[in-house]
Image (cartoon, rainbow, N blue to C red):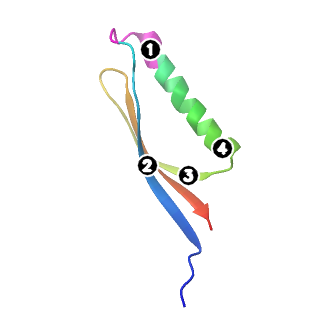
Amino acid sequence: MKRIKAACITQTIHFINKDITKSEYSKRKVQEEITRYKHRLDRERTKYKILSEEVEEDGSVFVQNILKEPI
């Protein structure tokens, strides 16, 4: 008999820069959104690991992470 002790989910999240002008303000808003996302994971005590964080030319960001949860 087998039992699952833990499971994980791999996510790739695209934080999109909604401003066409690519201003510093809009890039900063994307970074603030990422910070809020990470704080929410910490507040909910979700175990996670950021694998990569790629910033595009327009200021949008791809974040690849693993969410680990005990079952």
The first of marks 4 and 3 along the sequence is 4
- Give me the C-alpha separation between circle 4 and circle 3: 9 Å
Q: What residue is pinned by disc 1?
A: 26
Q: Residue at x 58, y 38 (%)?
A: 38
Q: Residue at x 43, y 49 (%)?
A: 11
SS state under label 1: helix
Q: What residue is pinned by disc 2?
A: 11
Viewport quadrant of the C terminus:
bottom right
SS state under label 4: helix
- Give me the C-alpha separation between circle 1 and circle 4: 25 Å
Q: Is residue 41 found left or right of 18 in the rendered image?
A: right
Q: Quadrant of residue 52?
A: top left
SS state under label 3: strand
Name which residue type carries label 3: Tyr
Q: Is residue 55 found left or right of 34 in the rendered image?
A: left
Q: Residue at x 68, y 46 (%)?
A: 44
User: What numbered label is drawn on residue 63?
Assistant: none
Name which residue type carries label 1: Ser
Name which residue type carries label 4: Asp
Residue 26 in the magenta stretch? The answer is yes
Q: What residue is pinned by disc 3?
A: 48
Which of labels 4 and 2 is toward the front? 2
* Furthest-left residue in this view: 57
**In the image, which residues are magenta?**
20-27
Name which residue type carries label 2: Gln
* Depicted 53 relative to depicted 66: above or below: above
- Give me the C-alpha separation between circle 2 and circle 1: 24 Å
